[in-house]
Amino acid sequence: MPQENSINLSIIIPVYNEELYIEKLFADILKYFNKKDIEIIFVNDGSNDRSKELLQNLSNNTNYTLNLNVINFQKNTGKGNAVRKGLSVSNGEYILLQDADLELDVKDSKEIYEIIKNDNQIKCIFGSRYLSGKLKKHNYFINQLIGKFNTFLFNILFGQSLTDIHCGLKILHREVYNKINLSINDFGLEIDIASQIIKQNFYIYEVGVSYFSRSVKAGKKITWVDGFKSYYYLFKVRFIDNDIPTQISIIVSTIYMTYVGSYFGMGLGNTIFMIIFFVIGLIIGLNTKIISSLIIFLFIYAGSLFGNGQGKVISVLFFFILGIYFIRKFKKIDKKKMGLISNLI
């Protein structure tokens, strides 16, 4: 629980083999955040270089005003797990996530903190390496391309217009943290955070930040394997990590929409249409609950009872559209009058 009027900002920094950067990072932190209402939480995720020793030296030195907490893991558990541990012991009203590798400028961290602190309407800000005219250095074209493509997919799946979901610089109000439940242990953390924030109906603001990409030789750890895993995480957070009514709705809607697709084309064309309508079913399932899905299915079934050949196709499509229209109208009914059934619609 946060200490009332004591800690205003918690900065969580996961560390794994960052001996080259820790001292410079801490010097930058002192430059911008050396205040008694700020706590820095370093989580040493099983480093096998001098990171633990350097962090201990910082902890032993009391020549600063901020609060410093160092947590050490014996084994490497992944960035996501390290951040979750830091979050669990944080006390600040605001929580800032900062990488230890100096690819992101601490000056930008200070900027987004000032923005969110001075606007009560903003609960969440993500840094973006692709906004503004700030100084940038990108070493790997493929990494940049995959990052933008993943963000594009995320926007499609969640109906957003973000520019950089993989940026490690983020700040949240504690109200946001209290409503999310992170579960991914590795670099999929960024996808996990973004998806849960959106599912809890918080708006994500973005601010352009500087970026200085380092090489593998200089200690960059994310690999092509993490790139492939990100697609699994995108699928997981969108289609698996949902409440039970939504999961049932997804199953039902994909079945009946695949059924609708079966009325179109022949041979390979029929298969393509079934795949397209399967995807449409996924989208419907994500945006409706079980009762709504069943009502749409009943409309489609009713449409299949009319006409033959092309006439039946038109009838099915017409009743499908009619079902969607009916549900949209139905959802406008006051939920208080509908009671518990409103959670299934």
Image: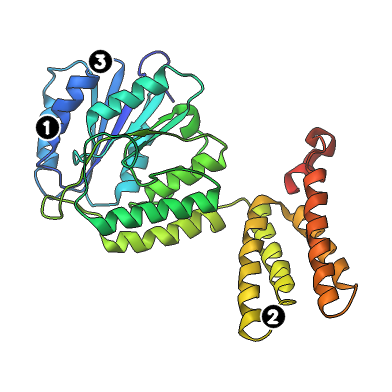
Q: Would residue 56 be seen by someone viewing this image from the given angle?
A: no
Residue under the image location 55 percent in, 58 percent down: 240
Q: Which residue is mark 3?
A: 35
- The one nearer the camera, 231 or 93, is 231
- The one nearer the camera, 82 or 191, is 191
- Residue 57: name its quadrant: top left
Question: Where does the image place residue 196, in percent across and percent down from the top left?
Answer: 50, 43
On screen, residue 165 versus residue 157, left or right, reads: left
Question: Count of labels shown?
Answer: 3
State the SS at label 1.
helix
Give how far apart the Cα atoms at labels 3 and 2 are.
68 Å
Foreground label between 1 and 2: 2
Q: Amino acid at mark 1?
A: Lys
Residue under the image location 22 percent in, 18 percent down: 34
Q: Amino acid at mark 3?
A: Lys
- Residue 343: name its quadrant: top right
Question: Where does the image place residue 2, in percent across and percent down from the top left?
Answer: 42, 23
Mark sitting on residue 24: 1
Dot placed on the residue nearer the N-terminal end, 3 or 2: 3
Dot placed on the residue nearer the N-terminal end, 1 or 3: 1
Circles 3, 2 touching at the beta carbon (< 8 Å): no
Q: Which residue is mark 2?
A: 265
* Residue density around tag 2, few if under 14, some if 14–19, many if 20 or more, within 10 Å: few
Q: Amino acid at mark 2?
A: Gly
Chosen colour scheme: rainbow
Circles 1, 3 touching at the beta carbon (< 8 Å): no
Residue under the image location 25 percent in, 36 percent down: 210
Foreground label between 1 and 3: 1
In this rendering, the answer to whether 134 lies above or below 91 is below
